[in-house]
Amino acid sequence: MLFSSSVFLFLFLPGVLIVYYLLLRRWRQAQNIFLLLASLVFYAWGEPWFVLVMMLSIAANYGFGLWVARGQSAGTGTKVPVLLAAVFNLGILFVFKYLTFTLGILNRLGGAFVIPGIELPIGISFFTFQALSYVLDVQRGRGQAQRSPLKVGLYISFFPQLIAGPIVKYETVADQIDHRKETWDDFAAGCTRFIVGLGKKVLLANQLALVADRAFLLEGADRLTTSFAWLGSLCYTLQIYYDFSGYSDMAIGLGKMFGFHFLENFNYPYISRSVTEFWRRWHISLSTWFRDYVYFPLGGSRVSSKAKHIRNLFVVWLLTGIWHGANWTFIVWGLFYFVLLVLEKYGHLGRGWPAACQWLFTFLMVNFAWVIFRADGPGEAAGFLSAMFGRGAGLWSAETGLFFRENWTVLLAGAVFAAPVAPALAQRAGRLRSVALDLGYALLAAAIFLVSASFIIKGTYNPFIYFNF
């Protein structure tokens, strides 16, 4: 079920809110059970069989959490249950996401394996990492093991962040499961945040996707002009930001409606002046997860030699690429960032440049990386990049002019709001607080919702990029 669907907006969400606040208002345990059931229904709506995988994950990680807690209290250690939890969770992820890819590689090396047809459960990378976070945070003393499997189930399956993040670490919400406080201010802020995310997704990302998808459909350098390659890559760079940050906004807003406070997942990444800064601002929950559970345990930057630090960066970025999918493009994408980060840290890349040059270089590198990320394969990525550098089917095409004329306003809006314009305006408006401004803000939010809803009802193009992961 999509957040940006009429079923969710006009049936599922209102129904959940009515039951939660009217029928179960003063009964926390019943509210938690109801949210768990609603979350399983939300997932089963489009994945009726894969909900069993989710329930298996809940049951297993509940058991691992108790095992870890028992080992801590008895002094028998926690290494075995943590290791088995990692094997179990990563094993599920491997079977559904990487098995066919691995068998295909082995067959090209001379093997003769039968490759099964395995469908990918939506959001498996997100809820698997979240489930593993539960066991690891219990082991580190950053949250108490839950005695009730229903509460573990709610943490893993809570529908706002279930299928496309943000990845919520257990330590962030452990106390909120039982002791959260719903307030009208949080509910109102959550509604507004949800509407902002909905507008990002429907009014910007979906429209940009039409141009990007057309460009990447051509892909090969012999079919793609230089101008259309640049237009398509820029549209995709903006599309993936508004698609994913819009979903994160909706997830954070929905969480607030029910009293949960999730950490931010995006902080205007396209204003970054280095790749290091970009990854502090982009998909913060994923980079934080790898930092806390992989990079730091390896020693991080506090190791005895440069070689070991480079090794740690290599491991993290290889795994980051693999996490995104079973395709060589994702591995190349991850290693591309690894090379850039090593050059920044040890080659002093960009150091001493004017701020504008630092920003432009970072943005171009990120844009090239998104081309690799979006392409169907390394060869297609090379063809697309070749076209961008003038080795395509000419410099200009009528198609470029047509798509630009039809979408220049969306491109302009996407470029403007990728910078922190909205917070600056809000801060200024806060100093001029008035009834008229508050009313205007409410009317603007209502207008965004109504226009977005009209697009949804009309059935416009509505993909979610990160559902693939």
Image: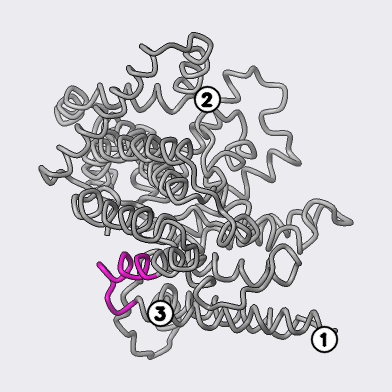
From mark 1 to mark 2, how far is it between C-alphas?
Answer: 56 Å
Q: Nearer the viewer, mark 1 or mark 2?
A: 1
Q: CA distance from mark 3 to mark 2?
A: 44 Å
Magenta stretch bounds? 37-50
Mark on residue 53? 3
Q: List x then y, in percent, for residue 423.
A: 49, 23
- Picture layout, residue 409 above or below residue 262: above
Of the pair 132 and 316, the residue shown nearer to us: 132
Camera sees residue 387: no
Considering depth in this image, is 169 or 411 the residue closer to the camera?
Answer: 169
Is residue 262 left or right of 380 when viewed as pictured? right
Say if 59 sits above or below 36 in the image: below
- In the image, residue 327 above or below residue 246: below
- Residue 258's place in the image compared with 282, above or below, is below
Tell which of 206 and 347 is nearer to you: 206
Residue drawn at (42%, 73%) of the image: 97
Between the residue at mark 1 and the residue at mark 3, the CA separation in whole angstroms equals 31 Å
Nearest to N terminus: mark 1 or mark 2: 1
Give yes or no for residue 330 being in the magenta stretch.
no
Between disc 3 and disc 2, whose residue precedes? 3
Q: Is residue 201 left or right of residue 217?
A: right
Residue indicated by mark 2:
360
Q: Is residue 346 or residue 30 the one in the foreground?
A: 30
